[in-house]
Amino acid sequence: STMEETDREAVATAVQRVAGMLQRPDQLDKVEQYRRREARKKASVEARLKVQSGITIEKSQPLHLLVSITLNLTGNEKLRKNHLHITFGEVAAFILLYFFFMFWLHWFYSVFSFFAFLLVPEIVRETQDLIERGELLQAHRKLMDLECSRDNLMYEQYRMDSKNTHDMNLIHTYFGDMQKLSEELAKQLWMVVQRSLVTVRRDPTLLVSVVRIIEREEKIDRRMLDRKKQTGFIPPGRPKKWKEKMFNILERTVSIRIEGTQADTRESDKMWLVRHLEIIRKYVVDDLLVAKTLLDQCFPPHYDIFNKLLNMYHQALSTRMQELAAEDLEANEIVSLLSWVLNTYKSAEMMGNSELSPEVDVNSLNPLISQNVVDQLLSKYMSTLTSNIIGWLRKALETDKKDWIKETEPEADQDGYYQTTLPAIVFQMFEQNLQVAAQISEDLKTKVLLLCLQQMNSFLTRYKDEAQLYKEEHLKNRQYPQCYVQYMIAVINNCQTFKESIISLKRKYLKIELEDTLSSSHTNMDATLDIIAKEGCSSLLDEVFMDLEPHLNELMTKKWLMGSNAVGTICVTVEDYFNDFSKIKKPYRKTMTIEAHRRVVVEYIRAIMLKRISFKNAEERKEGAERMVKEAEQFRFLFKKLAAGSGEDTEGLCDIIEAIAEVIKLTDPSLLYLEVSTLVSKYPDIRDDHIAALLTVRGDASRDMKQTIIETLDQGPSQPNPNYVPIFKEITVPTLTVPKLLK
């Protein structure tokens, strides 16, 4: 309180005066003399004080206290022991001094108040000019002087009379413009702080000035707070906390910088997020490098400015990434975001930049978004991707189907095989999504691969159905589509491409240890592709045999025996079709050639079994048999030519025709059973009705002979060729003209 302070000052002054009296050694000898003299004076003073005490104490309480303290001092035991005594004259002089000081203080206060009233506006104007000219240090110096004057006056007023708010308000009003000045200066400082990363490159001294001003203010804040603890007084506007404000400004600036990098929206640019994230990456790296190399030198070490900024950027990024994660992102956008958050952020392209080391340790950086948010995004990504893939595959198939009805042939690959773009489109899409998933994690890549193959499985079933519909539509009108054969070849070839692509995809993206998890699905896909290809090949052969039908119908007729060129036409037609079939890829082309060969032979034997001719005599039998052998040779030559390079032995098929010709040609009926039994032992799937039909075509076997031969054959051994594929079981014999013979 004011009283206590007055006491302390009186003691200090009294001690100082007594000490002044006893500065030489010879004065110590006179201490007793001083003491007695002062005792007498003291008694006299006390008497006079008693008379005047009523007035004195009322007029001046501090004076009364000062006198009491001084008198106590003169009678203090400790001082007495140390031969220290104060004369009453000195006390009186001190009291006069005190009165003079109090009078001077009141006078000074009044005069200063008057002059302050005159001078403050002028100093304020000067300070304002300095601020406008950007001379911030000088402006702050003047501001400090003004604040110091105001604060000291207020403090003195507070000491004299803390309850006198009128005088306090008067001082406050005198210095009213000074508060605006402080705010104006602060505004300038914050503008520099906001642009600190630019300023530090262009004009580092300006930034240093700002930091010095903030440091001065921090010092004043501390001093004022200390005085408040001691006296209870603190000037208005204190503490200013400019350092704290500076960090708040920096934090807000960093947030705005991060948010402000989004220049586009999805509507204006599909790549908006990629662009946004790339700009953020560049800004953050640039800013932190500037902070490390330049900014750090403009701040005192205890500001720890680089680490504070690093934390601000991390926090601002975390907030921004969470905002983005909460948006309704598309699948590719989710991937861009996760890839950036999980990989780019800590990579050498960003926080792992070697120039930021060792101040930035990527291992100590917290995740930008929580694992929970990551999982939600991944889950959303997988469900979005699933529906996308289904949509893409459906669209790809619809596009492919439109090609099937074109009037121009399909494209051929570099080896000349017909193909459509379907496998390339499908697997390019799979590849893109797998590469994208691989950017995020190994686990996601595997999940996406499984998803792709799972959807591929369903897609191939639809592909099979569409190929079947294509065939059925064509059969309604064989003139349409114009390039049916060529596009069906392309569909068959696509099956081989799909097979190879699936293997390639697995090899590239699937870990060996996960191979087993996909084996069943892979087997299913291969089986479906084989069915599509087989049905495609079969439908193409149906085309061939529909064209061959009129010529096949000529076989084993009178016209044929008279010298028809049906087989020649059949061979030319087959060869013509196989010129197109050469555009089929090898594994399927080989199967196709074997199947064509087999079907030609089956149709030829079927023609025999239809019993369209019955030879009248040995001459006709000989002529017919020779013709059969010759035509078998034509077929053999044709299919050898078509199977060139396939390494397939197909001669055995034509041997069946020659073996039947031997039975027809036989001139000695007694040997007929032997010849027939040889035929049956080679081809054990020959049924009784086949033998009966064959004997009918021979034209010389009675009903009883047929019966005997058939019954005897049942006991005979069979010695088929181990490579023989049953052929007779496919051939039915008409039963209208011949009674059914049961085994």
Image: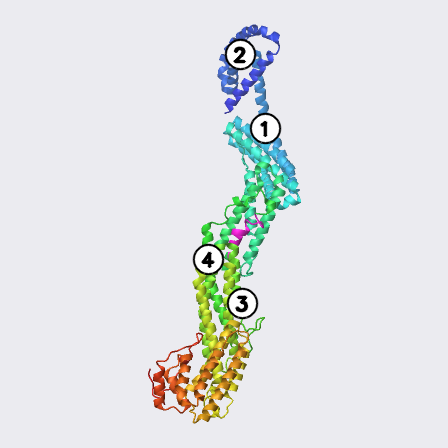
Numbered tag placed on residue 514 in the rendering: 4
Residue 79 numbered mark, or none:
2
**Mark 1 crowdedness (10 Å alpha carbons): few <14, some 14-19, many ≥20:** few
Hey, which quadrant is residue 738 in on the image?
bottom left
Judged by depth in the image, the label closer to the viewer, 1 or 4, is 4
Residue 678 location in percent, x, y?
41, 82
Q: Nearer the viewer, mark 3 or mark 2?
A: 3
State the SS at label 2: helix
Kindly state the secondary structure of the residue where label 4 is placed: helix
Of the residues tagged 4 and 2, which is closer to the observer?
A: 4
Q: CA distance from mark 3 to mark 2?
A: 111 Å
Look at the image and say whether residue 124 sits in the magenta stretch.
Answer: no
Identify the residue position indicated by label 3 in the image.
Answer: 424
Question: Where are the magenta residues, as a range?
Answer: 335-351
Residue at x-position 47% and y-position 90%: 624
User: Does residue 325 lie above or below 528 as drawn?
Assistant: above
Which quadrant holds the C terminus?
A: bottom left
Q: Distance between the Cα atoms at labels 2 and 1?
A: 41 Å
Q: Left or right: where does residue 299 sit relative to residue 493? A: right
Q: Earlier in the sequence, mark 1 or mark 3?
A: 1
